[in-house]
Amino acid sequence: MSQKAAKKELSPIDIYKLLPKTNCKECGQENCMAFATKIVAREVDIDQCKPLQKPENAKNFKILHEMLKPPVKEVIIGVGDKARKVGGKLVMYRHEFTYFNPTAIAVDVTDEMTEAEIVSRIKSTENFSYEYIGNTLKLDMIAVRSTSGDADKFKNCLKKVSETTNLPLILCALNPSVLEAGIMVIPKARPLLYAATLTNWKDLAELALMYNCPLVASAPNDLNGLVTLVKTLQAYGIQDLVLDPGTFFNDGLADTLNNFTMLRRAATKAGDELAGFPLLGLPLTIWANKGDLADDLVKWREAYTAGMLITRFADIIILHSTDGWVQLPNVILRQNIYTDPRKPVAVAAGLKEFGTPNENSPVFFTSNFALTYYTVASDLESSKINAYLIIVDAEGSAIDSGVAGRKLTAEKVADAIKATGIENKVKHRKIIIPGKASRISGEIEELSGWQVLVGPRDSSEIAKYLIDKWQP
Amino acid sequence: MAAKKDSKDSGIDVTELLELITKLQNLELHDFQLEAKNLELRVDGGVASIPGFKLPSAIPTKPAALLQQTFTSPIENYSSSIAEVKLGATKSEGGTRGRSITIGGEKAPAFYTFESPVIHKPVVTLDVFDMEVPLSKAVKMHVKEVMGDPAAWAKLAVEKFGADMVTIHLISIDPLLKDASAKSTLTTIENVMQAVDVPLVIGGCGDPEKDTALFEEVSKAFPGERFLLSSFTRDMNLENIAKLAKENNHAVLSFTPMDLNMARELNRKLYDYLGKEDIVMDLSTAALGYGLDYAFTNMERARLSGLLGDGELAHPMSSGTTNAWAAREAWLKMEDKWEPRELRGPLWEVTTALTLLLSGVDMFMMIHPAAVKTLKDVINNLSSGKKADPSKYVDWVSAKI
């Protein structure tokens, strides 16, 4: 086992030993041990320890940095507010810790598109927005491709792009002098450069150094070539790399997933530093090979390939389709995969109204476990029911496990009935409880004074239940 | 933008200057080794303060040629493999099916084909209901002709939609629906068996008592068919139905609500009556956007644990992928920018399916034909053993699309 492979098992003590132990609270924590605990949970950054930055602690600072360095390097693309971190992964599987830095999604424009088209694609990318469980889901970057191979055209395109957006950019050109013509328009914007290959690497390395840009190393389906490039570029002085092992379709799909998987495993499990960089997936390559396929079919394939790459370790993907139906499943998938599995996902307790309830409308309760809540909410909404829903704080557990584990108790339900003020909103005193909470029905009646009706075990049956049983 | 600002400050057009430097630099690069000293001098003498221009550090150590390196493929050793479960029995095997299908047997995580080839391709079983059910518009348009006629629906699923298997959901026995008797379903099953010769999944209604009665009747009425009885849950009285399943050569689906400890516990109970080769497990599927992360991680953990020696989780996995349609984004008429839902809906199902395919699912219960077609295409691609051909890699950078 390499030192890196053991990283996720770091204990607070390992960190504490190397801290200055001043308990100065400058970091905002109560003491050094509390700070160490937060460091291990990756909730604070080691740089927040001011005494650690004193010269006498330089050695420990360096050791700590090395200990905490993620096996997949974190690379920053762009500058300022919109700069986007990619990579920075600590683990291969999300259940081993959590994933950081959700897959960045880029949309392409080219130097042969009209200005109007460029602006419209950028605006649709910037304005993309979807509200989901309290999060606003967005797209992240613009990839600018030189399809003309002409330096002036690329330059002009970059001028238009940089006037239009502050989103981080990926500059894509096969000819280094074309690429450079583009970079010179935005010499300080730190775009990601695509790409150093086994043939052009020296020119690209010079550009990356000169303009301080992160650089993609690209070797389609050639992992030996890829690590050769990484080793060479590192020796050249380039630290911020992104890896492109190629995105293939059809017969090549298995190798594509294998390459992503092998690189990520080599980095996180075998401590292979040459594999320890963010991975670039290119669903848009399907467009370059579309043949006779109808556009909607190409979009369909691009969409589901993007999803597979998000699941299989891609840190950046570039898409061509801007359609909402293509992007939506993928931004939601990304949100799902990057949700912290260490935290039970809970919604705020309280009262929710569905439809336009009145004083005779039914009253339900459910748990604050997000999955339970959203399932019930979706069932109430989809069957267009007018009702009140009391969300009880069950410490983020589902109904059955909450009842079993005493996290969802009759006391809590009775308290919630009082706290929500539902008694002023309805004339009746009847609460419909989840079928899976039937065990505590008697207790709820006793404590709340409300009549308890045991509802269905699954909220999908609520509509039917109301038709059959509900009388205010 | 930054360059413009600077140029105002200093009175120099930085962009032009950078362009000039680049041209010089390119000239110098041709004789890079020889001219290194001159280059340094030139750089020191003039342009070191240009914004965005970074002094090349450590010039002498820059490699002049590629530093060759070999990638070591990180192969892991797994102590176990996933149990194989055979579904459907042919005439020679004591049933009436045209062929049987085996799932499971995997020796590595899903499609880690650098470690092990795919042993048994994951399969798709299409949902058929024994009565009219409310379905999303995007689904209904494909099956409305056969609604209420399970035999015709099954035929459509197999012959037109390419289903490997068919799940006949006997929801008419649901006390909240028709409350039909368990016995009354036997004719329906018989009709479906006449219509298609693929292996069948027999689906209950979710009511523990009614399903218990159903599995008793079905096990006895169709001995030797090797149905998959869906599903056995913790709140059922398992002894009798598990014994009957074993005696009559049926497999069972062990269903638990997203909790691996519950899954282990239920499987342990079933081991009293059934063999490993008789149990497929369903760890619960939540839709994309509605808990898919839990489902995905649960299944991924179960598969890894199974391979690493946890026998109680080393069962092939089934996913009720049709649950994807529980997500409102799958069926809802939304603002124009998210339309058409006729594409968004099945994409929701296929994205849910593919995510779970990569976690290790061996059997998918699905409903939309486009989602089924895509999933099967991907499974075939991933299982083909064919290689990516870099020589055919298209130049996507300059492709005019």
Image (cartoon, rainbow, N blue to C red):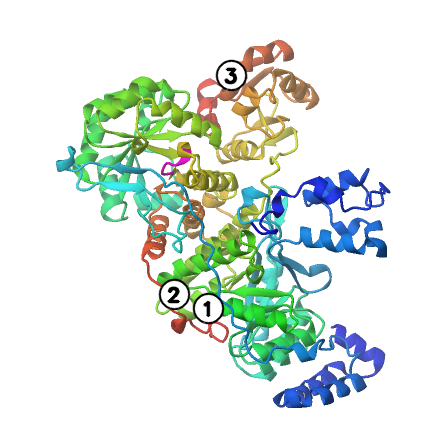
Percent x, y of residue B319 = 39, 39
Do marks 1 and 3 both belong to one polypeptide chain? Answer: yes
Q: Are marks 1 and 2 in contact (CB under 8 Å)?
A: yes
Residue located 56% across and 79% down the image: B65
Residue located 43% across and 70% down the image: A288
Residue located 36% across and 65% down the image: A293
> Which numbered disc flags the more N-terminal residue, 1 or 3?
1
Amino acid identity at mark 1: Pro
Q: Chain of mark 3?
A: A
> For this view, does B250 lie left or right of residue B269?
left
Disc 3 crowd, CA 10 A, few/some/many (<14, 14-19, 20+): some
In the rendered image of this protein, does residue A272 appear above or below residue B369?
below
How far apart marks 1 and 3 lie (CA) works out to: 58 Å
Mark 2, residue position: B388
How far apart marks 3 and 2 lie (CA) works out to: 56 Å
Mark 1, residue position: A220
